[in-house]
Image (cartoon, coloured by chain):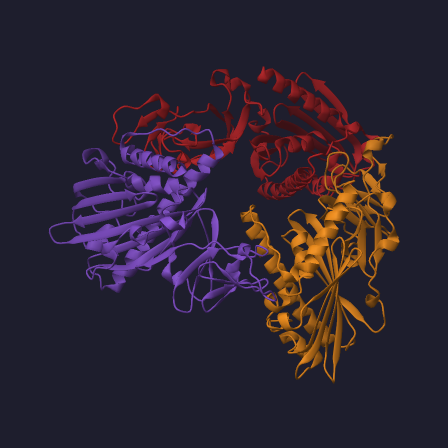
Chain colours: A orange, B purple, C red
Amino acid sequence: VLNDFWYVAARSAEIGAVPLARTLLNVPVAFFRTATGEVAAVRDLCSHRGAPLSRGKVLADRIQCPYHGLQFDASGRCVHIPNQRTIPASAHLRAFPLVEQLGIVWIWMGDPEAADAAAVPLTPWREGAEWNAETTYYYHVRASHLLMTDNLLDLAHVAYVHAGTIGFDPSRLERDPLVTEVEGRRVRNTRILPDVEPGPVVRDWGAFTGTVKRTSISEWVPPCFTFIRFVNEDAAAKVEMRIDHLITPETDRTHHYWVLVSRNFRIADPDLTRRMYEDNDRVHHEDVAIVEATQRSLDGCPDFREMSIAQDRGLNAAHRILAQLATSSAG
Amino acid sequence: VLNDFWYVAARSAEIGAVPLARTLLNVPVAFFRTATGEVAAVRDLCSHRGAPLSRGKVLADRIQCPYHGLQFDASGRCVHIPNQRTIPASAHLRAFPLVEQLGIVWIWMGDPEAADAAAVPLTPWREGAEWNAETTYYYHVRASHLLMTDNLLDLAHVAYVHAGTIGFDPSRLERDPLVTEVEGRRVRNTRILPDVEPGPVVRDWGAFTGTVKRTSISEWVPPCFTFIRFVNEDAAAKVEMRIDHLITPETDRTHHYWVLVSRNFRIADPDLTRRMYEDNDRVHHEDVAIVEATQRSLDGCPDFREMSIAQDRGLNAAHRILAQLATSSAG
Amino acid sequence: VLNDFWYVAARSAEIGAVPLARTLLNVPVAFFRTATGEVAAVRDLCSHRGAPLSRGKVLADRIQCPYHGLQFDASGRCVHIPNQRTIPASAHLRAFPLVEQLGIVWIWMGDPEAADAAAVPLTPWREGAEWNAETTYYYHVRASHLLMTDNLLDLAHVAYVHAGTIGFDPSRLERDPLVTEVEGRRVRNTRILPDVEPGPVVRDWGAFTGTVKRTSISEWVPPCFTFIRFVNEDAAAKVEMRIDHLITPETDRTHHYWVLVSRNFRIADPDLTRRMYEDNDRVHHEDVAIVEATQRSLDGCPDFREMSIAQDRGLNAAHRILAQLATSSAG
């Protein structure tokens, strides 16, 4: 796991008067929001006996242990031990830098000195007036985050896994092949189908009657993010979406998966918002299902060796970048 | 586990247009039936990324991976990789020889060269016109297959475990003892009770009013099969059954358990068929319950050493045969 | 685990015509009551094939294996093997000394020679005419027994964990501090609050209208017992309770937890008995919840090191006594 990156911790609305418990990168974290509205994150074990602080109470700018009442501020400092004057250094907790931005709380689990808020990935389409960015999803996935990353880097799966939702005729895979570009640490996969039936649910979003030009540009950014631009258009209509896939490892075998969907058409149509919410939820569940099934297969066969095929070029590039980052961070 | 044997994989009706996933001898297998009606079995991990093929689609004589659309034929050969001309040898899957016979699909998990269809155990009573062989059962059992084998080899348990169904007065165990014969790799246990109350559910099958002559001949055949001939008769009636107990290990701690029941009396009486179906289902659940409970006991006490008693002669013979087979197959 | 102590095995009513299965100190035990009313306990694996005797039948003074009918008496001696004359020494089972006293069955899992019935902890308040001792509780707790012992030895948790039931204002922790006394192997924690609001549910028990004098005396006795005297009184009323907390390890990560509540006021008031039953049940569930949550936290962070605070003096003393006992019993 790569520590020196910003990861998504939660959607803003999840952190309020009641603490939130969530394990990220194998570390249990207690999140809380102080009376002045700041978000805070500390290791979710009281330094005294290990009780989970996330079951405790928030008192103004502190979190109080549910077991014996020790209190900690947002920086992790122990500020109160009942019936005791001195507070030893070992009482303090590890705290984690956070950035709250556009409804998302980002966390830095690595060296706090290296935390630079400017490095949080930008999603400008989520704040422009011409975009509707209100739809977000969260999934808890019982599979390694690497398997979900592989899923997102391989646009060919769309023709099979999503055949009933946003898929297209698999024979087009060959006619209009994927173009893979690697720029520094980024991997971009582009597929343009100039004249194709829109996916079953996509037809309805754009009120398309015939074939469309379909453009998918998927940009992967380490360690765990994939930003997809998805455009379907014909002479009469054009629907453009930005789908941000944000992954945070929970354990080696599970991860948190957020999807943020923005669109720039019929943005004030609540019926379409609701319908697209449900359509895209089906799409994401299709991904979760195949990724979890693959994890179970691999768990049962630890000797399995994977084989690369032609369309895995982008995926292999991402694997190389991750391996380099792991080496340099270990060094 | 002994590989070079035929094992039961499924009942024919389980394998159709939708693939079947089943783990046998610790190997996950995807079963499917081609358009021409042939059954096929391949290892249930796509050679590309490990996705379970059993979640895919059957296309005429092929199975298609649900994830990225690779296609495999019944021999395990990869015959299509989307957007790629060459198919490397590493793309092919392991396939397993199958024999479909009398409604049962048998599988060979060992060296394919050694698979000889003639070695599938014969059950001639399942095809004779004077037999009704329509009743079959399947149970998934959370215990080592060895514990179920022990259960079936020890006819004394009938007096206790099946007291409420097909059991008899335990005092008869001493008066009419078990006769054990070993012939090559086969172990035969015979018990004849010349004059005994029929078991509570057996009385009804034969419309017996008094005592009966009860004959049980149980023949064990390695690695996992027990064929029982069970006869109850008085001056007026005779009911004869063949009960084939067919076990396939799933993992070291679980197994598949099929029971095929044939009878040669009132064979065209659907009411009796239904009643006997339910009666025997109770009997098998009694076996499953005691075997699973014993497994849980043993799991909790890894230091347990079993003790043999007089009636374990047949069981000990079977253990010796299995040990010899394991040694010779290891060599 | 310390073997040479009496532990609670069951409440008397749990052991009757049907055997009881319960694992204690990692050993599965089958309990039964003979026709003459004696309780008996033997290892819950038949010496023959390991089947659980607790699924068998009680025949007068014996328990019969559900699988093949072997019979054992209350001393663990095998007294019958079907169809076999000689009974080998290896057929006998380990049996455990028991003492039944005041509705509780105590068990000795250590060296049987050392079992001295006089060493069973005495609870005289449970038999005096001025006491109502009819209320007892049982909880199965998914946490090490040591964590529950820690909970009971630290009376400060009452102000936090039990704030909504029997708690008090946490600021009193400092004003009226805990007094800890160690006498041999016993640890006594005393806290007297001379003038405090009674706990939310306590107010109702005594019909208190204002503040009360609140006395808690908690005496811990190795290996796993905590006897609490809890008194609330004002000028008009005095309510006194004895709460016996009796723990028996089940496995390293789970334990059995009995609580016996006796009171010496309004002892013939069944409405109060019912209400107090429910109130105290809430209190115990608060303890179980925090202890299980702490276990889960610690399981996820095996590198956690606890930190002692001022009020842990009694708890640390108990830990030292347990360590000494473990050393001397190992020697």
Horizontal arrangement in the rendering, residue C175 relative to residue C238 (left or right): right
Question: Residue drawn at (59%, 62%), measured in percent from left and top?
Answer: B67
- Up/down of A202 relative to C114, above or below: below
Residue B20 in view in this figure: yes
- Residue located farthest toward the front when viewing the structure as drawn: B86
Q: Looking at the rendering, in which quadrant would you find the N terminus of chain C?
A: top right
Given residues B240 and C59, the one toward you in this image is B240
In terms of image quadrants, where is residue A199? Answer: bottom right
User: Residue A266 at what x, y percent from top left?
Assistant: 77, 78
In terms of image quadrants, where is residue A189? Answer: bottom right
- Up/down of B258 relative to C307, above or below: below
Horizontal arrangement in the rendering, residue A316 relative to residue A307 (left or right): right
Question: Residue drawn at (66%, 29%), measured in percent from left and top?
Answer: C228
- Up/down of B298 relative to B285, above or below: above
Residue A82 in view in this figure: no
User: Residue A232 at what x, y percent from top left?
Assistant: 72, 76
